Image: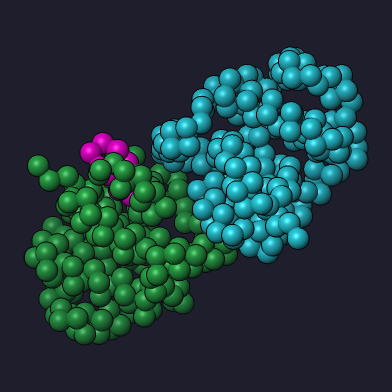
Chain colours: A cyan, B green
């Protein structure tokens, strides 16, 4: 039986971007499958009373240094998106929709959006910017707009988020290996251990 | 010139307890001195708008598991203190006072209080419990009471805390290597790197 690690993610979280780049390597080394679960971090925060680190100014400033230290450690290119905060509701609905279409399209979408969020930052609050990113990555923007407006997609993202809260999730990235929950890309070593 | 790592601590932080057990080993391996700086975490939280993880219930529950994972990783004995929250004002004033007396007495005090906080937990909200812990560790409780009531000691703790906030500190444990700040015992690898 293949082992599995579940990855709960929201494009708006820079630490999730770091995890996105590390988890596939870890999963592959441990012969494990990744279950990708799009969630809405804003909904998680609202339900749990948690909040973004940037809401504490000193913590927000420190996070910028901390993120860069991790990016250097991992040798990952990372640029903070100057257009923050970016509302990820449509983007996360898009993740749900792409996941339902095909794994290939889903992975292409993940790469495109994470890249436009933290590698070559774009203002993804603007629909035409999102459209351009999608088009550049071979995803039809009109199809996308149709999908993210679909009630079933909206409901699915809400359900993912509600279920996550019920399981104890309060932030992102969060990982599950069986019943064991791990929060933060800085706990990937524990995830690795749990898969071993 | 000997390298130096500054360690800003409050006995009330369980992650600081973990760091307390790891930092001396790291500093020794890197031929570095530890500068111990007692701070009042409650004052830091108040000044920065930060708060304890336990104020988000889901985060608090997860922290208990996370702390135990780290304790297992480090092979450190750790028990959550059932008498939480414990007001550490007098205990931190005591740290300032003991530090002014001698390094030997300061280290004995640190070991005694951290032990009574997270190893063999006592209700350190009660002065007679603190007194017994001190007596068992060769520190005169009456001397202690006199010292923690001393205005110079009170002022010094306040000053340590204010200065920490001015330097960007928002939580504990915090480490400085030169100008570089690191927050959290889970950043000890970065501290180690900075000392190397």
In the drawing, does residue B87 fall left or right of residue A86? left
Q: Residue at x 73, y 45 (%)?
A: A36
Q: Work out which quarter of the rendered image holds the C terminus of chain A and state it.
A: bottom right
| Percent of width and height locating residue A145 | 85, 24
Q: Quick one: quadrant of the N terminus of chain A?
A: bottom right
Position of B119 compared to B82: left or right?
Answer: left
Residue A49 visible in the picture: no
Q: Nearer the viewer, residue A121 or B131?
A: A121
Q: Looking at the picture, does residue A123 appear above or below residue B114?
A: above
Residue A125 occupies quadrant? top right
Percent coordinates x, y for residue A65 in the rendering: 41, 34
In magenta, the rendered stretch is B174-181
Q: Which image quadrant is residue B19 in? A: bottom left
Q: Is residue B185 visible?
A: yes
Image coordinates of residue B7 in percent, x first then y, are 26, 53
The image shows residue B40 at horizontal and vertical percentages of: 31, 56
Q: Report if residue B178 lies within the magenta region.
A: yes
| Picture layout, residue B106 above or below residue A68 | below
Q: Residue at x 48, y 37 (%)?
A: A74
In the figure, residue A93 lies in which quadrant? Answer: top right
Residue beneath the point at 67% across and 42% down: A9
* B106, B193: nearer the viewer: B193
Please give the name of the residue rendered at 45% of the width and 48% of the height, measured from the top-left corner.
Answer: B50
């Amino acid at each position: 039986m293949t082992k599995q690690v579940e990855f709960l993610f929201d494009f708006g979280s820079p630490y999730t971007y770091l995890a996105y780049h590390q988890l596939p390597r870890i999963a592959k080394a441990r012969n494990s499958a990744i279950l990708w679960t799009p969630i809405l971090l804003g909904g998680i925060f609202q339900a749990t009373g948690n909040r973004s680190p940037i809401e504490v100014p000193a913590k927000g400033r420190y996070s910028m240094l901390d993120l860069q230290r991790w990016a250097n450690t991992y040798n990952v290119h990372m640029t903070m998106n100057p257009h923050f905060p970016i509302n990820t509701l449509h983007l996360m609905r898009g993740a749900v929709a792409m996941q339902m279409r095909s794994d290939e399209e889903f992975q292409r979408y993940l790469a495109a959006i994470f890249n436009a969020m933290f590698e070559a930052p774009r203002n993804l609050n603007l629909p035409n910017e999102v459209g351009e990113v999608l088009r550049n990555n071979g995803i039809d923007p009109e199809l996308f707009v149709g999908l993210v407006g679909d009630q079933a997609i909206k409901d699915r993202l809400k359900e993912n988020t509600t279920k996550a809260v019920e399981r104890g999730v309060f932030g992102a990235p969060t990982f599950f290996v069986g019943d064991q929950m791990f929060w933060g890309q800085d706990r990937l070593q524990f995830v690795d251990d749990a898969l071993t």
